[in-house]
Amino acid sequence: MKISVIGTGYVGLVTGACLAEIGHEVVCTDNDAAKIKTLESGGIPIYEPGLEKVIPKARKEGRLSFRANPADAIGAGDAIFICVGTPPLPNGDADLSAIDHVARLVATEAKSPKLVIEKSTVPARTGQELKRALSVYSRKSNVKFHVASNPEFLREGTAVEDFLHPDRIVVGVEDEAAEKQLKEIYRPVLERTFTCPVHATGCPDGPAPAWLVTTINSAELIKHASNSFLALKISYANMVADLAERLGADIGEVVRAMGMDPRIGPSFLSAGLGFGGFCLPKDLQAFVHLAERSGVDFAMLREAEKINKGRIDRFFEKLREALWVIRDKRVGVLGLAFKPNTDDIRFAPAIDLVERLLVEGARVRAYDPEAMERARAVLPKVDYVKSAYEAAKDAEALLIATEWDEFRKLDWEKIRDTMARPLIIDGRNLLSPRDMKERGFEYRSFGRPD
Ligand code: UGA
């Protein structure tokens, strides 16, 4: 099928590249001309594992192209995926102005009928507004549009894998034609008829993805409710961790046993610095606002947000307890991205942590395998170094803020010997307290006996 993708951020670029990978002809556009230029010249503006395989291959085979002029992209596709940003407004609501702008563009530029698919995360009922906007702005051309919602469940860092091997595909539609068209788009994923680019030995075994057809309102609600629930789960684990600390229990042992109950499940129970990124925090806020505007007081979500914001305070309590005075102390920070395997620092707890360290007068040396360039743009006063060893050298405390795998495998004896004081505060419970103690570290983490 011929498909247009509007917006080439994390979601749009992965969506466009993967749709091309499974055989469609995809044209992507973005209002950031520099980004399109990078993509046109073979660069990839974000770090997302797998894209480096998928994009060059699809481009070479002529199935993926990038256009700065949105009209070119809109004209090219029978189906148009809207993947533009919906950032938070100061009051926490989702800013839908980019969606509105795209609706106007599509309505005025389209010369033939289109299926317009919302992929961006939007509050329930946005689809109805999108439909209205498309019909208002296309009244001169009289082109007909179908609208659908197809929320994404892509996690940064594994987004290519998540797109090609999802556990469910949700399509919110209002008519059979839209459902049929979407099924055609996803058929290779549902039937696994594409050659898997991420697994050398082909697609992993496992059940085929569930195909869920819902109303547009439900599809929109599914996305917000899912992300908010994940946030809730993390904040719950963090509160249990605080309690475990007071009671001399071990959060690792507690959540391991809890997670074995299939009704609870093992994931999203890792305690520490809490959740960040461009999805969970903003979706949680937008969901609370949506509930408020709909006359529902979703206080438990507000509490989850408050708990999450308080994680940095908890971290600083530990740091202050260990260091006494923070001012002028040399501190190493490992990790700046909001989670491993991404260069994304948006709403990253690690960035909040470093900002606070600077305010408190610490001398910060930081290392992240992928996110330093982005971090430098927002935190220029930090000394960015090329390895975890350099970050630790002469430091009076080493702080772990993101659980990159490479941090698990460091030569800790070497680090201990170069630090001014062998103190580690582990904001991601990455290391074993016993192990670190045996190696001669003063080690503190979350919800575990020191
Ligand atoms: C999240 C959802 O997991 C995806 O399903 C969704 O598609 C995506 O948002 C989106 O809306 O686009 P993502 O933001 O990539 O994906 O990151 P997550 O893997 O959900 O992690 C979010 C944050 O929670 C990270 O800061 C991570 O460190 C933190 N986290 C996660 C914890 O603190 N504890 C946990 O147990 C798990």
Image (spheres, rainbow, N blue to C red):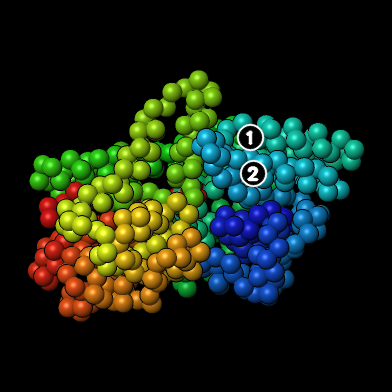
Q: Quadrant of the C terminus?
A: bottom left
Q: Position of residue 175 (x, y in %)?
A: 70, 34
Residue 217 sits above or below residue 335 on the image: above
Q: Position of residue 336 (x, y in %)?
A: 39, 62
Q: Residue under circle 1?
A: 126
Residue at (20%, 43%) from the top-left corner? 242
Q: Earlier in the sequence, mark 1 or mark 2?
A: 2
Residue 241 visible to the viewer: yes
Q: Position of residue 13 (x, y in %)?
A: 61, 60
Q: Residue under circle 2?
A: 118
Residue at (77%, 38%) from the top-left corner? 134
Mark 2 Cα shell of 10 Å, populated few (<14), some (14-19), many (≥20): many
Side (left or right) of 81 relative to 248: right
Q: Quadrant of residue 115?
A: top right
Residue 355 sits above or below residue 389 on the image: above
Q: Out of 309 and 446, give the one closest to the viewer.
A: 309
Residue at (14%, 67%) from the top-left corner? 441
Q: Quadrant of residue 395?
A: bottom left
Distance from the alpha carbon under mark 1 to that under mark 2: 9 Å
Q: Out of 73 and 162, give the one closest to the viewer.
A: 73
User: Is the C-beta separation of discs 1 and 2 under 8 Å?
Assistant: yes
Side (left or right) of 341 relative to 189: left
Side (left or right) of 104 relative to 233: right
Number of the label disc, if any, that sits on residue 276 = none
Residue 28 visible to the viewer: no
Three-letter residue code for mark 1: Thr
Q: Out of 321 and 184, give the one closest to the viewer.
A: 321
SS category of the residue bearing label 2: strand
Residue at (11%, 65%) from the top-left corner? 437
SS category of the residue bearing label 1: helix
